[in-house]
Each structure stands twice: as structure tokens, then as C-alpha cells.
Image (tube, grey):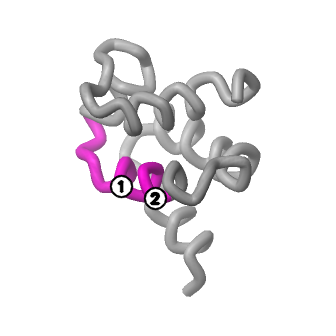
Amino acid sequence: MNELNRLRWQCRRGMLELDTLLLAFLESGYDDLSQNDQGVFAELLSYPDQLLFEYLMGKIQPIDKAVAHVVEQIRHPAQG
């Protein structure tokens, strides 16, 4: 299984909102990330669904600046 397929599988979560945001970003914005940010995205997929949901809905801000940057890319991909 290649890296993109593995990430696609990990983007499938228990919440429709997360599935939609993460899969859309993987298809349209992931390739534009730096290699470091791609690693942060992969790390983000290991977070619990509820925390990921709160980050992506803007309810809480990640403390880690690299994570916050990638979260913003997912939330607002056109702002690149």
C-alpha cells in the first residue's frame, strides 16, 4: 500500500465532517504541502477524532505551530 493510499484510509474517520474535510484536503491540497507539513498532516491523522474535530472546526487552536499551520491549510486550502 503506497503512502497516499495509507493516508486516504486514515482520513476515513467516525465523523462525516472529518471524512469530508480530510479526504477533500488529501485530494486537493496535500500535494502542495512541504515535505515537513506532509509529515505533520500524517501525524495529525493519529489524533483522536474529537480533538481533530475541535481543531478543524476552529473550536480550539493547536499549541504546536506546525500543527496549527496544517490545520489552517485544511480549514482554508485556498489561502495556501
Name the residue that disc number 2 marks: 39
Q: Is residue 45 left or right of residue 63?
A: right
User: Is residue 38 or residue 12 the one in the foreground?
Assistant: 38
The label number, if any, that marks residue 7 in the structure image: none
Q: Residue at the location (29% across, 16% down)?
A: 60
- In percent of width and height, residue 54 lies at 32, 23
> Looking at the rendering, in which quadrant would you find the N terminus?
bottom right
* Rendered residue at 61%/52% (across/down): 34
Q: Which residues are magenta?
A: 39-50
Q: Residues within 10 Å of mark 2 (few under 14, many from 20)?
A: few
In this rendering, the label closer to the viewer, 1 or 2:
2
- Toward which corner of the image does residue 10 lie, by quadrant? bottom left
| Element assignment for label 2 | helix
The residue tagged 1 is: 43
Q: Residue at x 40, y 38 (%)?
A: 66
Relative placement, left or right, of 13 versus 73 is left
Q: Residue furthest top?
A: 59
Pointer 1 and pointer 2: residues touching (CB < 8 Å)? yes
Residue type (three-letter) at the residue carrying disc 1: Glu
Query: What is the three-letter code of the residue carrying label 2?
Result: Gly
Residue ID at (40%, 29%):
68
Depicted 32 relative to depicted 39: above or below: above
Front residue of 15 and 80? 80
Is residue 63 placed above or below 41 in the rendered structure? above
The picture places residue 32, in percent across and down from the top left corner, at 72, 48
Crowd band around label 1 with a 10 angstrom C-alpha radius: few (<14), some (14–19), many (20+): few
Q: Left or right? Give the position of 49 relative to 73.
A: left
